[in-house]
Amino acid sequence: MKKRLLSMTLVLALAAGCLAGCGGSSDSAGSGETITVLNYGKYIEEDAVKQFEKETGINVKYEEYESPEEMYTKYKAGSIDYDVICSSEYMVEKLIKEGEVLEMDYAGMENYKNLDSTIVDMTSSYDKDHTYSLPYFYGTLGLLYNKTEVDPSVVKSWDCLWDPTYEDEIIMENSVRDTFAPALIDLGYSLNETDESHLREALDVLKKQKDDKIVYGYYVDETADAMIGEEALIALCYSGEAALAINENENLDYSVPEEGSNLWIDSWFVPKTCKNQDAAMQFLNFICRDDIAEANFEYVQYASPITSVVENQDADIKANEAINPSSESIKHCEIYTALDDESTKLYSNLWQELLSN
C-alpha cells in the first residue's frame, strides 16, 4: 500500500470544507441519491469523498482498480452501472470512440474555471473538442533510482534497464503499455506501435531482460514501498509515485531518460451507464474545487491541472521533476493513443507471453 502524508494544508482544507460550497447548496437536488465511482487505487483522499457526501447528501459507492485494462474489463462486464470513472487518456479515447461516454456540461460547473487551459488543451490528443473528459492528474513515466548506488548519468538512458549489472535490481511496471514503452523507444518505435513485427522485437528485449534475471518484479502500487525499503536499485514508475517515495527516502531520485517517454493524463468521464448525470457533475465540480484539489495533490503527489495548486507550491516543489514535469521533458514525450480491438488483443497476447516466459 502506498504511504500518504497528510499536510496541514490538507487537514485545514477538509476541516473547512463545510464553509465552501460544491457549486451548489447542501440541500441540493441530489440529496439522498447515490453515485458509483470507479478510480485507480489510492487515487483520491478518502476524507474528500466523505466530505462530498456530507455537503451534498449524495452517497458514493467507491470502487478501485489497478490498470486501465482492468478498468475496461470491469466496465464492459456490465454488472455495475458506474456514474463517474477516472482512467488513462488512451482508455478514455477508446471508450469515446465506442460511444460509451456522455458529453459533459461544463457550463454548469462553477469550478471548471480553476483548470489550467494549457493542460486542458493537451487533452485534445484524445478528446478533440474537450467534450467528454476532465483532466485530474498528469505526469511522466520515468526511472526512480537509488542515487547512492546508481550514478545519475546511468538513468539518463533506458539502456540501464537491460544492463546485466543490475541483476535482480530492476522493477518493471505490471502494465503492458508501460513496460513495452522503454523497449519500443530504445528500438526507435512509437509508443503507439501496432506493427506485430516491431512489437515482437520489443518483446524479445523484454524476454531477454527477464531471462538475464534483471527483473526484480512487475509492480504498480507496490513500487514506492519496495524502493523506499531499498529492495531494488531502479524502478520504472510514474512520476508522482516517485515523488512519494523520494519524500520517504532521501537516497532516491527520479529521471526521465533523454530518449523520451510517455506523458500521461488521467481524466474523469461520465459513462453512458450513468443513472444520475447531475449528481455525477456535482462530484466532478467538487473535485475541481481549489481546496479539494489541494488535498488530493497532497495525498497523491502528481501534477495537478488546477491552477491554484501549482501557484501555492514552494519553489522547490514547482521545480521537482517528479511532481511537475518540465517543459523540456514534455517536449520529448508522447501520449498514448487508443488501440483498436485487434491491436489490444495483440498487446494482451504478447504481455501474457512475456509473463509466462
Image: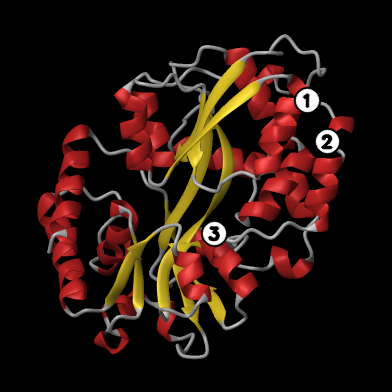
> Looking at this view, is 349 or 249 the one in front?
249
3D distance between C-alphas at marks 3 and 2: 25 Å
Could you tell which of marks 3 and 2 lies nearer the N-terminus? 3
Q: Residue at x 69, y 27 (%)?
A: 285
In the image, residue 17 sits, relative to residue 108, either above or below, namely below
Mark 1 residue crowding within 10 angstroms, few (<14) / some (14–19) / many (20+): many
- Report the residue marked by disc 2: 17
Give the SS element for disc 3.
Answer: loop
Could you tell which of marks 3 and 1 lies nearer the N-terminus? 3
What type is the residue that disc 3 sits on? Lys
3D distance between C-alphas at marks 3 and 1: 28 Å
Q: How many marks do you count on the picture?
A: 3
Quadrant position of residue 333 = bottom left
Could you tell which of marks 2 and 1 lies nearer the N-terminus? 2
Give the SS element for disc 2.
Answer: helix
> Looking at this view, is 108 or 272 the one in front?
272
**Horizontal placement of 174 versus 209: left or right?**
right
> Looking at this view, is 355 or 308 the one in front?
355
Quarter that holds the C terminus: bottom left
Callouts 2 and 1 close, C-beta under 8 Å: yes
Quadrant position of residue 60 = top right
What type is the residue that disc 1 sits on? Glu
* Residue 121 x, y percent position in the rendering: 57, 39
- Report the residue marked by disc 1: 55
- Report the residue marked by disc 3: 2
Q: Residue at x 32, y 53 (%)?
A: 175
